[in-house]
Amino acid sequence: MEKKHPEYQYLDLMQRLLDKGDRQADADTGDVTYSLFGEQIRFDLNQGLPLLTTKKVFWKGVLHELFWFLSGQTNIKYLVDNGVHIWDDYPFRIYNDKREAEGWPDISKDEFVEKIASDQEYANQHGELPHIYGEMWRNWPRKDGGGVDQLQWVVDEVKKDPSCHNAIVTSWNPEYLYAMAKPGEACRFPICHNMYQVNIKDGKLCLQLYQRSADIFLGVPFNIASYALLVEVLAKITGYEPGEFVHTFGDVHIYENHIEQAKEQLSRKPLPFPKVTISDEAKSLETFRPEHVTLANYESHPPIKAELAVVGGFNKKIHETPAEEEGV
């Protein structure tokens, strides 16, 4: 009996969302989704890198975004300079939220991104996304003003103790999230893939991601590839073979305006997964570079375009505490 292609885990989940998803509307934008709670898919990386094949996934974006996180960066200029624009909307949203009060000019997103690319000072002022994944992974803010390098600690821990059960990295810092934050300090973008744990099983490095909120059509294919690649990188750095990537979801959903695109993707048959290799030059988090990664034999069906919904972040209507309530 022929083994079912592992990509069907993703496709079957998307079909369940279409068939059984609970209808919800975003409190801020009104965007409608159909969602399920508590789903899980898992990939054995010995069967190839789960870079989905039923539509083309933006590999360059996966690679450079992961390096952006791993290197602790928080400014989108690195991504813009490398032709990756998946984070452009968030600092542009912040810019527009502050524009009138600060007297900044009304410009288009394209003009904003071009200024980020061409002007380092402008990028320093407007391209920063504080408390995003790279900072939380590599420089979690401590109460004494220093930083905790969670990811380096995980690397060191699994090297010293392969039986450890505590190798966890979290990006969920309540001090900067939603109404838990002090007035004016809340993040304006969502922390969605908020915690992962590394575990060694049978001499192989495995990783489980908990993702609190997941856009099945646009975001999840990217997330699967990114964290599977993270397994490969961490395995190389720590001296283990790559094992399993386990993807656990909180609320996983499909946007109403992605349904027709999803149906098109569901009509396609998966192709063999590609292979990825990491150069021996990647000996540590500090020495790892995107050019150390080689992707081979990636074949896919054509891309399917859909509009990104910039939702799920700070909502002034329900997350902003009035100044008078704070005694300010």
Image (spheres, grey):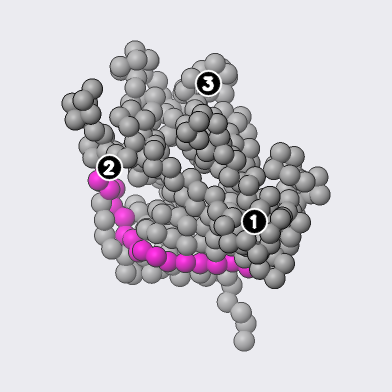
Q: Which residue is mark 1?
A: 231
Quadrant assignment for the N terminus: bottom right
In space, the residues marked 1 and 2 are separated at their CA atoms by 35 Å
In the image, what residue occupies the spot 34% across and 22% down? 98
The label nearer to you, 2 versus 3, is: 3
Give percent across and percent down for residue 297: 71, 58
Instruction: Report if residue 303 lies within the magenta region.
Output: no
As shown in the figure, which amino acid type bears the numbered disc 3?
Answer: Asn
Q: Which residue is mark 2?
A: 29
In the image, what residue occupies the spot 30% across and 16% down? 101
Could you say which is closer to the camera, residue 269 or residue 64?
A: 64
Could you say which is closer to the camera, residue 326 or residue 1?
A: 326
Q: Is residue 3 above or below residue 166?
A: below
Q: Is residue 243 above or below residue 285?
A: below
Which residue is most to the left? 324
Q: Which residue is mark 3?
A: 124
Between discs 1 and 3, the one toward the N terminus: 3
